[in-house]
Structure formats: C-alpha cells, structure tokens
Image (spheres, grey):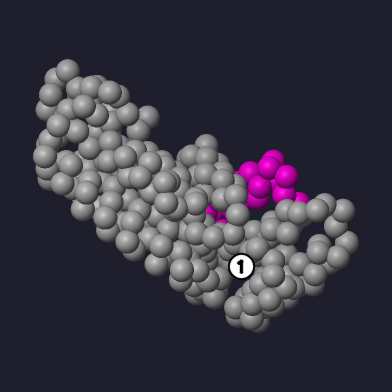
C-alpha cells in the first residue's frame, strides 16, 4: 500500500495535488479528520481489492487543533504498519496567498469577523507546524502555475517507483530566484557563459554546439569533477539517513546554458550509481 498525505496552507494548491493523484489511480479523500488516519490505513490494508492500493488524503487547517497537534504520533502509527507513506506539504509566500484569495474571492477557513485574512494565513502556519515539520517533500508554489504544479507533483511523487530516497537534479537561473525547496545549491555563474557567443545565445545546454563549447572549457570540467565527486560521496549518506526526497540545484544566471549542461551531465553520472535520480530544468522553456 502507498499512502500520500497532502497538506499545506490554504491557497497553496492542495486541491490541484489531489486532482493529479486521483487522475493517476489514487483513491482520494479531502479534509480527512487527522484522528482517523491510522484507522483509514488499517481498513485500506484489510478490505481493499487492490494488490497495492493507492490512497491519498488531505489534512489541513479545517481539522481540530487537538488532532493536528497529535499528527506526529498518528503518522508513526501508520508507518508502524509498514505502509509506504509520503507527507507532501505545499506552501507559498504570504503575498501570493493573499493575492490568490483576493482573485478567487474564496473565504479562508480560519478567517472571521474578528480575524483578517492576513492574520488567518499567519495563524494557519502555526497550526500546521506539526505537519510541515515532518514533510517528506515540500513544494513552494509561489512561482508555479497550475500546469507547472501538476508536472512537479508527477515528477517528484509519481515517478518514485519504490521506497527510498528520490533525488532531483534541477537547473535554474538566479535571475528568477533560487529554488526555495533545494537541499543543496551549486552556483556555476563563475564559468564561461555561452550567452556571450552570438551563435550560441538562442540555444540551450541541451544543444550539441553549447555542450561542445562548455566541454572544451577547463573550468567547466573542473567544476563538474568537483561537484560530481561531492555528490557521489555524500548523497548515499542522505539516503542512509532515510531522507525521502533530496533536491540538488545547479544555478547560472539565466538557467539556459551552463546550469542545464551540468545538470544533464550530473544526472547521468548519478543515475549510474543511485536508484532514483530525476532531472529537471526549471527555467528552460
């Protein structure tokens, strides 16, 4: 059995996450009382007709505070039944959440005549703290549109074929901000930049001319060797510490050339020794 618990602040994309999981064969339950989590898991194990049932539940601020505070114990009960369980926590910055509620004119579940929307969002952070602290995977949706969020959930959650650590090597451009959910970040802006070669500017690190140009640069090769040596040594230690997800960010200025090239090389290198390595280019469009 595989169980995915979806949580996060209101407006962060939980409904989208559940919809993606439902479209991919999960039996989904929205707003499950947290206290029923162990019983649900037990019943799914006993009564399901599926050999490997897939269940996803949403647990959020609509729960009783007393149930949310007990979440660590409830999660432990579920995992003691030897159920593969991932906790997905979605979030976004406060300004983005305020904007989303204003645009949709939805009422926040914690807002009232005596509590403003901004106060409700801040209170929700504290209320969901026990879940956020135990999240296996946190996705910040501030800069993600609906389609990007769907793709991210499919890549990180649904492409994880078996229990164990899922590694993501992700290129990005610093001009659009660092990925807030990255565990390790490597800055490669000091390397020669193909952008300043007119014939390479409109291409990316996936194109052969750019790859050949970068492969011929001694600094690029030295950077690759240093990063790959570090990751090959230390990523297995992350896996040994029972981390479910590890994200490695490789960043250059625009996220089109140097970071893409190195991310592709590092991904292929890691895939030779680690079971579940994914590659993503955040800013490559």
Dot 1: few (<14), some (14–19), or many (≥20) neighbours within 10 Å? Answer: many
Highlighted range, magenta: 5-27
Q: Quick check: 205 left or right of 135? A: left
Q: Which residue is mark 1?
A: 61
Residue 173 percent across, percent down from the top left? 27, 42
Q: Quick check: 39 left or right of 262? A: right
Decide if residue 92 is in sight here: no
Q: Quick check: 166 left or right of 255? A: right
Residue 268 percent across, percent down from the top left? 38, 41
Q: Quick check: 250 left or right of 241? A: left
Element on which disc 1 rests: loop
The C terminus - image quarter: top left
Residue 275 percent across, percent down from the top left? 49, 51
**What residue is drawn where x is 17% and y is 28%?**
213
**Above or below 201: residue 280:** below
Figure quadrant of residue 150:
top right
**Above or below 5: residue 272:** above
**Above or below 92: residue 82:** below
**What residue is drawn where x is 14% and y is 20%?**
198
Residue 77 percent across, percent down from the top left? 69, 77
Magenta stretch: includes residue 105: no
Image mark count:
1
Decide if residue 210 is in sight here: yes
Return the residue found at the far front: 273
72 or 97, nearer to the observer: 72
**What residue is drawn where x is 68% and y is 60%?**
3
**What residue is drawn where x is 35% and y is 45%?**
269
């Amino acid at each position: 059995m595989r169980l995915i618990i979806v949580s996060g602040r209101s407006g962060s994309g939980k409904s989208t996450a559940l919809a993606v999981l439902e479209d991919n064969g999960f039996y989904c339950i929205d707003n499950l009382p947290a206290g029923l989590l162990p019983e649900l898991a037990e019943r799914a194990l006993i009564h399901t007709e599926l050999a490997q049932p897939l269940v996803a539940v949403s647990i959020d601020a609509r729960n009783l505070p007393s149930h949310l505070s007990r979440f660590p114990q409830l999660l432990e009960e579920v995992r003691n039944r030897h159920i593969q369980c991932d906790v997905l926590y979605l979030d976004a910055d406060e300004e983005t959440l305020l904007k989303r509620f204003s645009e949709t004119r939805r009422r926040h579940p914690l807002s009232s005549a005596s509590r403003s929307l901004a106060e409700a969002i801040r209170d929700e952070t504290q209320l969901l703290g026990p879940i956020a602290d135990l999240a296996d995977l946190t996705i910040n949706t501030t800069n993600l549109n609906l389609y990007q969020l769907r793709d991210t959930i499919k890549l990180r959650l649904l492409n994880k074929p078996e229990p164990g650590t899922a590694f993501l090597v992700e290129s990005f451009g610093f001009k659009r901000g660092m990925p807030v959910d990255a565990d390790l970040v490597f800055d490669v802006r000091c390397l020669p930049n193909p952008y300043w070669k007119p014939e390479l500017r409109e291409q990316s690190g996936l194109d052969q001319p750019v790859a050949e140009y970068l492969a011929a640069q001694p600094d690029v090769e030295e950077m690759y060797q240093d990063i790959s040596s570090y990751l090959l040594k230390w990523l297995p230690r992350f896996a040994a510490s029972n981390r479910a997800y590890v994200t490695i960010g490789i960043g250059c200025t625009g996220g089109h050339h140097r970071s893409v090239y190195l991310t592709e090389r590092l991904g292929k290198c890691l895939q030779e020794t680690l079971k579940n390595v994914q590659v993503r280019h955040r800013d490559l469009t």
